[in-house]
Amino acid sequence: MGRNDLVDELLGSVKERTSSGAIVYGSIGMGKSALARHLTGTVQDFAVPFLLHAGAGMANVPYGALTPWLTAASAADMESSVSVLRALVLYFRTRSAGRPVVIIVDDAHALDPDSSHLLAQLVTAGTVKLLAFARKVPGRSEELSSLSEDGLLSRFELQSLLFEDVRKVCEIGLGGRISQGACAYFMGESEGNPLFLRSLLEHAVRTEALALSDGTWVLIAKPDGLDPGLSDLVASVVRQLPDAQSDMLGAVALAGKLPITDLSALGGDDDVRALLAAGLLLPLPAENSLVACHPPLYGRIVRTLVPAARSASLRERVTHVGRGLPPFGKGRIRHLHWALDCGVTVDDPILLDAAHVATSRSDPESGMRFAGAVQGGGSMPAAAVEMARAQFLLGQPVLMEASVFSLMETAKDPETLSAAAVLAARVAFAVHGTAEDVQAAVRRLNQLLTTRFDDPADAMESVEYARSEAQLLGSFALNLEGRYVEAEEMLRRLLESATPDAKLTVLACAFLGEALGATGRGTEGRKLTARALGMIGRAPHALAEFQSLTLTRHLSLLIHTGEFAEAEAVLRGHQDDEGDSLFYSAGTLSAFEAILEVRRGRFHGASPLLSTAIATLRLSDRDVVLPYVLAVASWAAAAVGQEARSRSLAEEFAGLSHTGALAFSLIGKAHVAAALVLLEPTVEHLAHLADLAGSARERGMWACEKDILEMSLLCGDERRVERLAQLTSSFEGIEARILSEYAQAVLTKNPARMEHAGDLAENSQKQSLSVDAAARALRLYAASGDHSAQRGVLRALRRRTGLMERANGLIGGSADQVRDLTAREREIALLAVNGESNRAIADRLTVSARTVEGHLYRIYSKLGISRREELATVFEAPSGTRSNSQ
């Protein structure tokens, strides 16, 4: 996996006359042996391969590695290198029968010097071609390396697997889909090392940390312990190191990261270079010449190999030559773990800061340990808040709802009080999914700030800061309730205040961007959320806790304003984030990835993404987006004809006690109603969509109203197209411009304008709308008798239908699409064509007249027409005769 290009280059190196082969370097577990075996089979197409395993057990025996090929050599022959060389040449010629010979050497670094010398001679003479695989360590003989330096052998380095390769390996190994969070965890721990990845997977399954949920493998906890086999392998490598290098590797593993200058003081520069060359340490030039174990799992294993006494001794030596605690990040967190392991007393302020940073960087286990190590009575309330934050990230918020509100009552300073209020609001929202408890936390925070800190002598600045945080929390609640205009006023005042603070600015930009996007100003909103993300990127350690909150709002704005390409780029870029971060936030991000595909009209492609997101969110849904995702999945399933799945998801949505933010609740209900229109077209379902759009309009939730009106139009209901045209004419963003043109074309019955709207939609990847526009234009041209224009639009319709992956539930059209009607729909359509009234059709089929009317709405949508009289046009063959085959 992920090696196809390298395999092609290696094969080319032994095929070309001007090349003698290649040498490939890679650290333990990078797949050298697997490549050697694979190439042994592939080379047979054009040459005779000879696979040689250079085991360490024969490294001190002259010609030991070549023994399998020297069975015919006498004892006297073995006394002369020339005789041994002749014996080898004879062996290869006898067995190759005149075909080219390719020698493939696994673990070439373990070759004894004599074997290495003879292989180099064979290559130099052109007798054989060579593919050698070696670790990045000094070999017992450098002759093969010198062939690379002389240009006879090409040199390659095995690279780590990329994220998508890791995903494929996981899914092939597990036999099913894997959640993005689990994949990110395995990627982060293995850093793309295939052997380590396989070990991690097997250990996670064995310990039941990785579980199958609704067809998706999801990590329900970080796996405890380490795989014994991999631990033994790493231990065997460490035992072979000189004492100085072993100490250096142990110190880096225990510290997490160390400056090269400090490491050199523990041994020597040559030892550092040897560990780097072997790939056991990785330089991190972007972090002030630091080095770390590579991959991180290697460091975890090495830490278990260091006895407690030696660990304490190494810490004393590192502390003596070092420069104190490193800057905040994983380096400092690992240093503090090391200190606590050694029984060192750490000051409470350092522990509290470390607990906050650890939890903010999605490392709640470390946060709990540091908060639990706080000893001073005055620091205990703050430690309790940090402990609760870690528990919130790790567990079920419903279990801690009562206790977390009590933290506000015990807070001894404004900062702790504010942090407790924010946590209480987050927990309450995760449990109940409404803004009411969030507002209650805001009110209690303001009350306590007034009554408990009424002496401004020494706390005025921190009290004012806490009041600003209360305003931010209040604006968050207003957005949840759909009161975007009020939130905008509050947030603009906050941003214009005289106290520019990074944390306040990031949150204000994120919430204000959300409010602006919800009221039709998506372009301005995206600029604000992008500004907030930029600030986080420039100060990740200080602002990491706001990454997920800001990112989800930015993605939502991009997706709901039609900036699909940019949204995809943002999602792909986030895959490079640390595995721990995605482990805890991947459910929400997977949801946005799936919703992006649905809004593009890629319903089949979205299906596995939706299943993965739902499986993950059922385990942890702190942002309360599961209801929305269930509704979107129901709509997507209905669009591709998966009736049972669509109904099941709709029932799960209806059975939830809460549906999150009001905007997500309304749009979720709209998706379920639209799904039911596709499955069982009735006037009631269409009316429900219209009612939901009206509710959004009354509350000033205009972006939500826009989305619902678009869905209504796609479902065949044109009654509110004038409102859609009016609404989108003042909106910002490409999607609004497309919808405005589309709505105007429907209003004016202008086929050329409908074509233009369809072209804009196709170019912006809004395929559902592009198909609907083409179907409507086709019908309008057919009605006017413009057959030439009709043929052109039909070609566009067919192309766009393919881009939609044939989601027939949403494809309107022409006579070519009549076959996409269900049997009952064709029956009703033909009865209507023959002049039967709705009541007569209902009596004949023993259904209600409303059901017939609903079916006709759906038939019109599929066929791209808008009234009963046009059915005859669609059901006629090109010759003008009625098509009985339909």
Image (tube, helix red, strand yellow):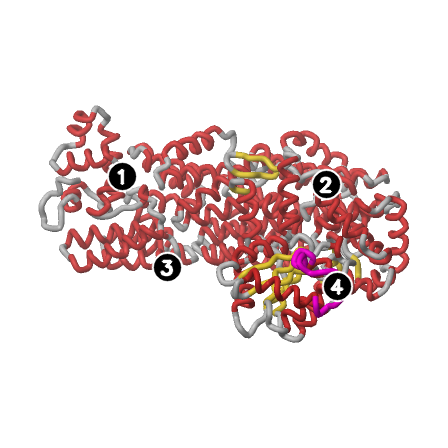
Q: Looking at the picture, how far across and down is residue 17, in whole percent? A: 53, 73
Q: Which residue position is annotated with label 4?
A: 76
Q: Looking at the image, can residue 251 be seen?
A: yes
Front position in the image: 218 or 716: 218
On screen, residue 32 above or below 176: below
Instruction: Identify the mark at residue 228; answer none if there is no mark.
Output: 2
| Residue at 74 percent of width and 38 percent of height | 387
Instruction: Identify the mark at residue 858; answer none if there is no mark.
Output: 1
- Secondary-structure class at tag 4: loop
Foreground disc of the pair 4, 2: 4
Name the kind of residue labelled 2 in the image.
Pro
- Secondary-structure class at tag 3: helix
Name the kind of residue labelled 1 in the image.
Arg
Front position in the image: 485 or 650: 650
- N-terminal label among 3 and 2: 2
- N-terminal label among 2 and 1: 2
Q: Which residue position is annotated with label 3?
A: 763
Direction from residue 632 to residue 757 in the image, left or right:
left
Q: Looking at the picture, how far across and down is residue 268, in whole percent? A: 85, 64
